[in-house]
Amino acid sequence: MGVGGMAQGRKPAPKKYAAAVVPLRGEDVPADVPAEREPFKVPACPDHFSDDAREVWVFMCEHLDRVGLWGAADVFKLMVFCVAVADWHYYRRIMNDMDGRGIYETRGRNGWQRKNRPEYGRMKDAEERIMRIGSDFGLDPVARQRLRLMAAGGEPEQGDLLGSLDTA
């Protein structure tokens, strides 16, 4: 090890890395740095969506835009959410045509057995996707409370999350 300590070596050329340096408060902002981001524009509904998925897309885009929980990174997740809701509606309609029952009975070698219909399993899978992705968009009470706390400028502690829920 040399005499100079650990901070030896060539120093970077200031001009080469100037674009990567974020100016601190009070410093002049270079002219090539944009002052503000452009607002996010809601994309058009994908062409391959079913009618049910299109309805969900329009509703969710309006809702997310109104509450300010919308960005370019959320588009794909919203697409998956809309398709999951459309799938759930599709399989729910099939179940309604079968008297709403997701179980049927069959006789096997061990006697009568109750089995789930394949449509019921697919409907439950869509339901799980809806619940999982919907919480990212604030569509359940705990997620809404978490988003409120984050919007207020704080990150809730583990014990404070349930204590700060509205009791009314």
Image (cartoon, grey):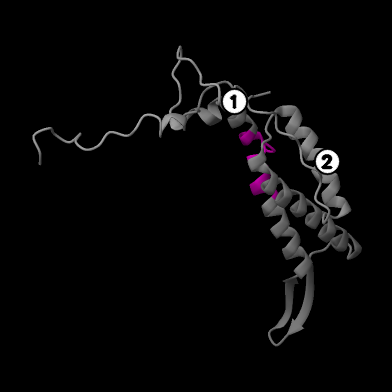
Q: Secondary structure at mark 1?
A: loop
Image quadrant where one finds the C terminus? top right
Residue 42 figure quarter: top right
- Name the residue beneath numbered marker 1: 34
Q: Nearer the viewer, residue 64 or 93?
A: 64
Residue 135 visible, this angle: no
Residue 89 figure quarter: bottom right
As drawn, the label of residue 58 is 2
User: Could you tell me which residue is drawn at 77 percent across and 33 percent down?
Assistant: 63
The residue type indicated by label 1 comes to Pro
User: Could you tell me which residue is drawn at 79 percent across and 64 percent down?
Assistant: 102
Q: Nearer the viewer, residue 129 or 167?
A: 129
The residue type indicated by label 2 comes to Val
**Crowding at label 2, few (<14), some or many (≥20) Cα neighbours within 10 Å?**
some
How far apart in space, not on screen, are marks 2 and 1 (Cα)? 31 Å
Residue 124 visible, this angle: yes
Left or right: 52 with respect to 108?
Answer: right
* Magenta span includes 112: no
Question: Magenta residues, as a range?
Answer: 130-143
Q: Residue furthest right?
A: 97
Q: Nearer the viewer, residue 32 or 72?
A: 32
Q: Secondary structure at mark 2?
A: helix
Looking at the image, residue 44 lies above or below residue 99: above
Q: Main secondary structure of the magenta part?
A: helix
Looking at the image, residue 105 lies above or below residue 9: below
